[in-house]
Every structure is written in C-alpha cells, then in structure tokens.
Amino acid sequence: MRIDNRLAERLKKIKPSSTLAITSKAKKLKSEGKDVISFAAGEPDFDTPDFIKDAAIEAIRLGFTKYTPSTGTLELKQAIIEKFKRDNALEYAPNQIVVSCGAKHSIFNVILTLIGPQDEVLVPLPFWVSYPEMVYLAQGGVCFIKTEAKDSFKVTPEQLLRHITPKTKLLILNTPSNPSGCVYTRQELDKIAAICVEKNIFVISDEIYEKLIYDNLKHVSIASLGKEIYNQTITINGLSKSYSMTGWRIGYLGGPVDIVEAVSRLQDHSTSNPASISQKAALAALKAPDDFIKTMKGEFQKRRDYLVDRLSAIKNIGFIRPQGAFYAFCDIKNTGLDSVTLSTRLLEESLVAVIPGESFGRDDYVRLSFAASLEQIEKGMDRFEGWLKKI
C-alpha cells in the first residue's frame, strides 16, 4: 500500500487549527511556571452550579449508569421541548428532538445527514472554526460569504442572494456569533428566512450562546418566524455555555421529523446515547430557574464593558462592540502583522494568549475572550497595550 493512500480522501482537506497551536503553547508556558494571561478561552470560567453536580452524583448513586435510548431519555426530551416553547416560541414533539454529545456533535450529525458531494453549504465569514471542516468531512462544498464590519459581521439579504447557486442546500447561521459577538434582529432574520424559503434552502441555526446577550437585546430563533422556515430549520442548542457545562457534553437539536429520524439513525450507529449521568445533570439544569445564568451574564457584561473601554483607547486596534457571547473580534490590520504572527509574538514576548483570526477566516483579526476575571483582563490588557506600543 502506498503511504499517501493510507488516509481516506475526506481527511485530506481537514487542516490542523492554529487555535490549538496557540492554546497548547500557552498551556506549556503556564506549566513551566510562566505568568500567562489567556484571552483564548472558549468556555465560561464559572464552575458548574452545585445543584447540577448533585443531580449527577445522585444519578450515579441510584445506578443510572446504563445505556439510555440513543437520542436521549424521554424526560430530558420533554424538558428540552418545554425550554424551546418557553424561550424560543418553538413547538416540538419528542420525535423531533435528538440529544447528542454536545452542540458540535449535533451540528456534525445534521451536516452529515443533509450534505453530500453534490451539495454546497453557505457559511458566513467570520465563522466558527469547525463549520467548514464538518462540511468537508461530509464531502460537500463550502461557499463563504464575507461579511463586513460595517454590518456588524451579519450577512445581508443581498449578500445571501448573490452566493446562492443551484448546488446550495444549507445555510449555517450562528446568533449570537462566535467569534464576532453579533446578534441578528427579528427584522434581519425575517429577510433571511424569506430567501431561504423561496430558494428551498435548509438552515442550521446555532444558538448555543442564546443566553449570553447584552444591552437588553432579545434572542430570536429563525425557526419561530413562520411554518415554512420552521420546516426548513434545524435549531441547535446545548448546556455548555449557558450552564458552564462544557465538559459534560450535552447538546440537542429540534427539527423536521424526517431529518431528525435520519439523524437518529446516524447516532444509533456512531456514538449511541450521550452519557446517562450528563443527561440527568442536564435535566436538573433545564428545570431550574435562570438565577445562575442571570448572575453569569451580569458578570460577563461588566467584563465586556471594561474590555471595550480598554480597546477603545488603543489607536491601531479596531473592533465591533460584541452584543452577545463572550468574545471581542479585533481588527489588527494597522499593526502590519497577520493574526498568527501577532498571536505568536504576543504570547512569546508578553505572555498574553489571543486566538488568531485565521482560524475564523479573517487573518486580519484576532479574537479576545472575556471569559476571565476582571483582574486578569486588566492585567492582560496592560500587557497587550504595552506590547503594541513597542512594535
């Protein structure tokens, strides 16, 4: 066998992430005793609430450690149905819900279910790092829609129409967005929905940051905007960000029965059920009041406001005020450096970790996470600003 034929063709387009390279280097420096300040985190720095942990411990004690139905327990599905109805004005039945091993797993399942070699997926740019790679693994094509800072990195109806071809089958929409923090309004989503209905395009609506929206803005699920778009949308969510449960690996989706049934078959023969214990923890989270979320969101808004004030004072860095999630996407064109060079040098020379925008399709940007304490953000920004003055 020839060495270059050892790997399947589908893996040849999948590239390693510069995000992982930076975070690995930051962790190595930290393990060596270096005082690294990280703006790289893609997860809340809050601990999972105790009442959720207690539910998991109780599940273990009661022996809830066996297989569950592949797509999740009925009681958890019912809690998800109630959540969709309460928060998103979406009506689903149990056979329209799949619980998976994280929202990423849910998205991957849908892409693998819908997309093949003849299909094309519209991905607004900047994008979350895994969207295009998932499409490549499904052997589909990706059509990037380059959004503009003047539009808060939101795809416009005109841009959407320009990029649709006979091969277009799916649009991936992320609101609130990672990395830009943009939040689509109802009016903007109405226009996108009308186009997708007219052109018969499916929508993956990634709403994992739904609970982290600031300035009294409201989250809107595109599937709630009419029967037609409801029948073409798969709504993705999970507990990783809203309940600080990243390691518990629980995500879920709601969608049309035929697509959900196909996703269910796929999950039957791949991962089977998400961890039984994590499902009990998720059940406790979804049934509880939103007190923890409100506290965490309030703290994130304070941090966002401080970070924005600091960034505003730096002349050669541009940014759009994030409306949701916990990231600031910063324009570094005026530094004369690309994102990987800036991120590498900043880490090596000032022990500050940021994520290169190259990973999100914009090599002229870097992403800063404010999922760190105010003290750490202040210290990190002092170093960042000082380093920029030196170069």
Image (cartoon, rainbow, N blue to C red):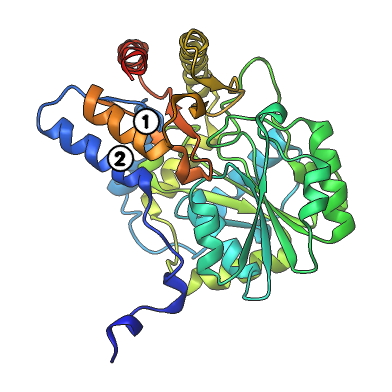
Residue at image position (41%, 29%) is: 44
Q: Is residue 324 above or below residue 14?
A: above
Question: Which quadrant: the C terminus?
Answer: top left
Q: Residue 354, which numbered label? A: 1
Against 319, is 198 above or below? Answer: below
Determine if residue 246 is in view: yes
Labels 1 and 2 touching (C-beta < 8 A): yes
Among the two numbered marks 1 and 2 on one chain, the one whose residue lies closer to the N terminus: 2
Q: Which residue is mark 2?
A: 22
Residue 190, how many percent across, how many down?
A: 84, 39
Position of residue 257 measured from the top left corner of the image (x, y, whole percent) = 72, 64
Q: Nearer the viewer, residue 258 or 56?
A: 258
* Viewer-proximal residue among 53 and 319: 319
Query: Mark 1 belongs to which amino acid?
Result: Val
Report whether residue 99 is seen: no
Q: What is the spatial separation of the Cα atoms under label 1 and label 2, in whole angstroms?
A: 8 Å
Residue 337 - label: none
Q: Nearer the viewer, residue 386 or 137?
A: 386
Query: Crowding at label 1, few (<14), some or many (≥20) Cα neighbours within 10 Å?
Result: many
| Picture residue at 56% right of the left edge, 51% below the top | 252
The N terminus, quarter of image? bottom left
Secondary element at image label 1: loop
